[in-house]
Image (spheres, rainbow, N blue to C red):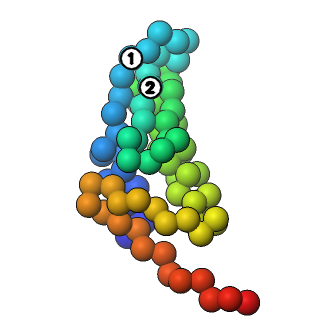
């Protein structure tokens, strides 16, 4: 399910050229704060995938619910109090 979520998020990514030393910019609109830049489109995609992974793991660690992306939802198990 995690792989499906990551794939759906990356498939929904939007890329554009910006006026910057790293002119390729990409973001995932459904996931606030997930963006990256790169010198090439492929580098930007790799950087975006890394940012996405970090964002998902950080959100899970904080116990935050993840939004659905393109109809794919990542359901986390309920935490059991210690």
Residue 10 x, y percent position in the rendering: 36, 46
Q: Is residue 16 shown above or below 4?
A: above
Closest to the observer, 38 or 56? 56
- Quarter of the image for residue 18 reads top left
Label annotation for residue 49: none
* Residue 67 on image: x %, y %: 41, 59
| Figure check: 51 above or below 38 | below
Local SS, label 1? strand
Disc 2 from disc 1: Cα separation? 6 Å
Left or right, 4 with respect to 31, comes to left
User: Residue drawn 30% across and 44% down?
Assistant: 12
Out of 69 and 36, give the one closest to the viewer.
Answer: 69
Looking at this rendering, what residue extends furthest in the right direction?
Answer: 82
Picture residue at 55% right of the left edge, 12% below the top = 21
Instruction: Determine whether the residue tagged by mark 2 lies in a helix, strand or loop.
Output: strand
Q: Report the label total.
A: 2
Q: Label 1 near label 2: C-beta < 8 Å?
A: yes
| Residue denoted by label 1 | 17
Q: Residues within 10 Å of mark 2 (few under 14, many from 20)?
A: many
Mark 2, residue position? 25
The N terminus: image quadrant? bottom left
Going 55% across and 52% down the picture, which residue do you hit?
55
């Amino acid at each position: 399910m995690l792989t499906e979520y990551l794939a759906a998020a990356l498939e929904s990514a939007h890329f554009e050229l910006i006026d910057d030393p790293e002119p390729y910019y990409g973001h995932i609109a459904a996931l606030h704060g997930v963006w990256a830049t790169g010198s090439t489109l492929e580098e930007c995609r790799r950087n975006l995938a890394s940012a996405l992974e970090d964002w998902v793991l950080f959100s899970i660690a904080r116990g935050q619910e993840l939004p659905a992306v393109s109809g794919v939802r990542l359901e986390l198990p309920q935490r059991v109090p210690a």
